[in-house]
Amino acid sequence: MISKEKLNILISEEDMKKRIGEVAAQINRDYAGKNLLVVGILKGAILFYADLVRLLDMDVQFDFMTISSYGNATDSTGEVKIRKDLDTSIVGRDVLIVEDIVDTGLTLKNLKEVLSTRKPASLKICTMLDKPSRRRVEIRPDYCCFEIPDRFVIGCGLDYAQWGRQFKDIWYVRPEFIDTL
Ligand code: IMP
């Protein structure tokens, strides 16, 4: 379990909601008149995905993938594996990947490479959060709600050892507690 005594709020629910509205407006402009396959990365992106897709105006279809990432630690293993693949063919489709956070970038770089070989018409990335200072490989999200400093964050779908995903705000682990979670 995770105690909020060890956490502070980084981004409030209200600020996140407002920013998701702005990003959705940008996506609506860019894909006006098209139809979009929105690919959510489970499990972390699920709440952001649900908030975002409800604000999209164009015709949208849903699909989801599960990619392995951290396990229970707060640092990347560098290992990236597809555990659940798409149900849909993406040949000739406009595809938008919706992710919770870009950290080292390993997950999305690998995923983008895999999906590009399947010949989509276009392939873009929308992330709720970005930690650019942690990047190990070159990758830039096309849409991003907030860039954040190098902090381990929880809430709005993001977890620590599967806990805290349902928190309404984005919280960070206070540095003095990072080793005691
Ligand atoms: P990357 O491959 O290092 O970019 O890591 C991406 C994945 O790591 C995300 O989809 C998250 O599941 C996880 N992750 C990275 N940073 C955090 C964090 O601060 N809190 C919770 N999960 C994180």
Image (tube, grey):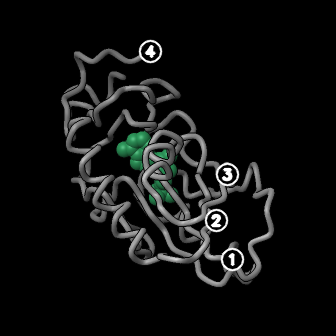
The answer to which of marks 3 and 1 sits earlier in the sequence is 3
Nearest to viewer (mark 3 / mark 1):
1
Amino acid, disc 1: Arg
Q: Are marks 1 and 2 in contact (CB under 8 Å)?
A: yes
Specify the quadrant of the image occupied by residue 88.
bottom right
Label 3 sits on a secondary structure element that is strand
The x, y position of residue 107, in whole percent, is 55, 61
CA neighbours of label 2 inside 10 A, class few (<14), some (14 to 19), many (20+):
many
User: In the displayed structure, would residue 130 be above or below residue 138?
Assistant: above
Residue that appears at 33% across and 62% down = 23
Q: Looking at the figure, which quarter contains the N terminus?
A: top left
CA neighbours of label 4 inside 10 A, class few (<14), some (14 to 19), many (20+):
few
User: In the displayed structure, would residue 77 be above or below residue 2?
Assistant: below
Amino acid, disc 2: Leu
Residue 93, disc: 1
The answer to which of marks 4 and 3 sits earlier in the sequence is 4
The x, y position of residue 7, in whole percent, is 24, 26
The x, y position of residue 102, in whole percent, is 42, 59
Q: Which residue is mark 2?
A: 37
